[in-house]
Image (cartoon, rainbow, N blue to C red):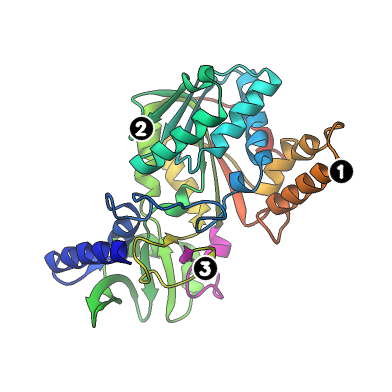
């Protein structure tokens, strides 16, 4: 709580300097990324049973093995065998991919991890040193910013949902909501009646169907993120895995309170003003908006499929059918596949979108 109080004071000072209110995206940026105090910039455990939420690599090594099989198929088509992972979390995805490469004799040249959090960099390094060979570790590099140039496969698992979002509300007209500090707590306040977020939401055709008091989010980070990555790549395939919707579902009339969610010790709730710095704040991905931003940056869009489809196409069921596995191991692996692929679990909530630059390769997980 002392940690949270220090971050609250920092944000309150920022609000005062800004004239009494800031955008929600600014507030979310502070909560997640304020150096030494933000959720992703401080020292608590985020992932797994001891953390606040579980990602697919925490569920099963089969997730990373399936991605490794997709990577191998792309390398066979001529993609440079280099990997760049955004936000590597606990490091388990990297470990599982490289273990699979080693077990199948798949040649790879480098694995770069773009991780802006010094704390998470240190945790990943300690974990991977215990899990991988010294030879493999020599080919892994940690970055805090994009490399100057990159050719190969770019991976991002649950990266887009952690980008700060703007919050907009439809009344007689669209308003953007911001954050103020009153009565000793953060409060929703009106931020703007004309802003980039409002213009972005007004450009979506289906918003005409939405009723009064419809609240939702707009992510203004897709465009600069895609432009930045495009500028640093020569030939690349990009695979982003995240929970989200196409706009027909994202801006559905029944989803009138948006998709903003917070996670604290494996409990979810919609209040971003509780425990700043101690809870994760996320919003679902608008995959249509992300695809449009990618196209505008110069990428081609290869496809969008559910996580279940992607994993099945990359042989996740074959990975559990090892003849030397005992019955208990088979049961455990089968349960892991169910969690990763069933509609009521991660299978349809999570989707995979593929981009390419200066390539036209077949991405098996996005076919059919």
Where residue 73 sits, quadrant-wise, is top right
| Residue named by callout 1 | 327
Q: Secondary structure at mark 2?
A: loop
Q: Secondary structure at mark 3?
A: strand
Residue bounds of the magenta highlight: 245-264
What distance separates the C-alpha of mark 1 from that of mark 3?
A: 35 Å
Q: Answer whether residue 247 is magenta in the image.
A: yes
Residue 83 drawn above or below residue 314: above
Q: Is residue 141 visible?
A: yes
> In the depicted view, which residue is nearer to us: 276 or 195?
276
Chain-order first, disc 1 or disc 3: 3
What distance separates the C-alpha of mark 1 from that of mark 2?
A: 45 Å
Can you tell which mark lies on residue 146?
Answer: 2
Quadrant location of the C terminus in the rendered image: top right
Q: Is residue 356 visible?
A: no
Q: Answer whether residue 131 is magenta in the image.
A: no
Report the residue at 42% width, 80% height from top. Answer: 213
Residue 105 point in image, percent of width and height: 67, 17
Chain-order first, disc 3 or disc 2: 2
What distance separates the C-alpha of mark 3 from that of mark 2?
A: 32 Å
| Residue named by callout 3 | 268
Q: Residues within 10 Å of mark 3 (few under 14, many from 20)?
A: some
- Please report contact status of discs 1 and 3: CB closer than 8 Å, yes or no: no
Report the residue at 55% width, 52% height from top. Answer: 48
Report the residue at 60% width, 49% height from top. Answer: 351
Mark in the foreground, 1 or 3: 1
Q: Residues within 10 Å of mark 2 (few under 14, many from 20)?
A: some
Quadrant location of the N terminus in the rendered image: bottom left
């Amino acid at each position: 709580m002392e940690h949270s109080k220090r971050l609250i004071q920092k944000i309150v000072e920022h609000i005062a300097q800004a004239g009494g209110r800031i955008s929600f995206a600014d507030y979310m940026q502070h909560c997640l990324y304020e150096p030494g105090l933000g959720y992703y910039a401080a020292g608590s455990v985020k992932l797994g049973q001891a953390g606040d939420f579980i990602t697919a690599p925490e569920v099963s090594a089969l997730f990373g093995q399936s991605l490794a099989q997709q990577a191998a198929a792309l390398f066979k088509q001529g993609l440079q065998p280099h990997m760049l992972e955004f936000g590597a979390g606990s490091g388990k995805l990297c470990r599982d991919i490289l273990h699979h490469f080693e077990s199948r004799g798949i040649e790879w040249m480098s694995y770069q991890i773009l991780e802006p959090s010094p704390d998470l960099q240190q945790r990943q390094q300690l974990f991977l040193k215990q899990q991988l060979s010294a030879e493999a570790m020599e080919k892994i590099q940690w970055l805090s910013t994009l490399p100057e140039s990159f050719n190969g496969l770019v991976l991002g698992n649950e990266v887009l949902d952690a980008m700060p979002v703007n919050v907009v509300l439809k009344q007689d007209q669209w308003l953007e909501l911001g954050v103020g500090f009153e009565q000793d707590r953060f409060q929703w306040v009106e931020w703007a009646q004309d802003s980039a977020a409002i213009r972005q939401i007004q450009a979506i055709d289906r918003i005409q169907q939405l009723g009064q008091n419809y609240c939702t989010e707009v992510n203004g980070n897709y465009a600069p993120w895609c432009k930045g990555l495009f500028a640093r790549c020569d030939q690349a395939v990009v695979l982003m895995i995240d929970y989200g919707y196409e706009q027909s579902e994202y801006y559905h009339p029944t989803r009138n309170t948006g998709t903003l969610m917070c996670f604290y010790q494996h409990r979810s709730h919609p209040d971003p003003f509780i425990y700043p710095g101690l809870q994760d704040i996320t919003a679902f991905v608008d995959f249509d908006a992300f695809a449009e931003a990618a196209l505008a940056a110069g990428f081609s869009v290869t496809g969008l499929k559910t996580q279940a489809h992607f994993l099945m196409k990359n042989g996740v069921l074959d990975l559990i059918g090892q003849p030397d596995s005992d019955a208990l191991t088979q049961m455990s692996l089968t349960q892991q596949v169910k969690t990763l692929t069933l509609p009521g679990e991660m299978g349809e909530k999570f989707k995979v979108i593929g981009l390419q630059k200066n390539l036209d390769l077949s991405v098996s997980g996005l076919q059919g």
